[in-house]
Image (tube, helix red, strand yellow):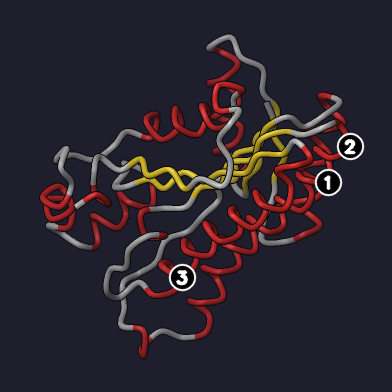
Amino acid sequence: MVLAARREDRLATLVDEVRKSGGEAEYVVTDVSRGDEARRAVDFAVERYGRLDAAFNNAGIGWDRSPLHLMGDEVYDEVMDTNVRGVWNLMRHEIAAMLETGGGAIVNNSSVAGFQAIPAAAPYIASKHAVIGLTKAAAAEYAGQGIRVNTVAPGTTRSEIIEGWFERNPGMEKELHRATPQGRTAAPEEIAEAAAWLCSDRSSFVTGVALPVDGGYTMV
């Protein structure tokens, strides 16, 4: 396993956790919004393991809620560069590597915000819709060449981004619980299980899917 992210301290900690649990992991510090760094991360994985069979593109940033007309260009640019360009950069190089060895599976991380909108979050909503669009486009283009491309669309999940959002918006977690039939926030591991399934051969006839992992949020 190769992990890639901007923060080396977090990468080193996670690699240590994986190794202590009996797994194998390496890391490469990467800003996925930069095409050269995305390519370097993919090349590192191929050099280390000889091929790339599966990839989970999970890099993303949130937002500070604000009306669209009050948002500056820098907010839009920052969100889109990471959430959309990052997926674009990684998929280009992942697909090229997989074509060399007969195929593979890619899973992108979108959000329930890729299906529905909430106020005061326009760039984030746009970015997550775009991730689903990129996923479907790539799935259609490469299905015949052995590459499956899917996306998970998490609901409210206890991630670092969401925790910060809850702190800045008191009462929001309870509001989201009321809108979620299961009435709770997901653990990150629950999203990871769905992504792992989509990366595995157990989902061999699944491609172009945006899979909600949301406690029923999008069905209501």
Which of the pair 216/146 is nearer the observer? 146
Q: Residue furthest bottom?
A: 69
The mark nearer the N terminus, 3 or 1, is 1
What numbered label is drawn on residue 100?
2
Please tell me how crowded label 2 is: few (under 14), some (14-19), or many (20+) other residues with Cα within 10 Å: few
What numbered label is drawn on residue 126?
3
Q: Is residue 178 above or below residue 85?
A: above
The N terminus: image quadrant: top right
Q: Is residue 144 left or right of residue 174?
A: right
Q: Secondary structure at mark 1?
A: helix
What numbered label is drawn on residue 114?
none
Q: Position of residue 72 (x, y in %)?
A: 46, 86
Q: CA distance from mark 3 to mark 1?
A: 27 Å
Q: Position of residue 205 (x, y in %)?
A: 58, 31
Quarter where residue 57 is shown: top right
Q: CA distance from mark 2 to mark 1?
A: 7 Å
Q: Is residue 4 above or below residue 124?
A: above
Q: Secondary structure at mark 3?
A: helix
Q: Is residue 33 above or below residue 152?
A: below
Q: Is residue 151 left or right of residue 121?
A: right
Please tell me which residue is depicted at 38% across the width and 35% down the height of the picture. 188
| Amino acid identity at mark 3 | Ala
Tell me the residue that label 1 is attached to. 96
Please tell me how crowded label 3 is: few (under 14), some (14-19), or many (20+) other residues with Cα within 10 Å: some
Labels 3 & 1 near each other (Cβ < 8 A): no
Labels 2 & 1 near each other (Cβ < 8 A): yes
Q: Secondary structure at mark 2?
A: helix
Q: Position of residue 62 (x, y in %)?
A: 42, 61
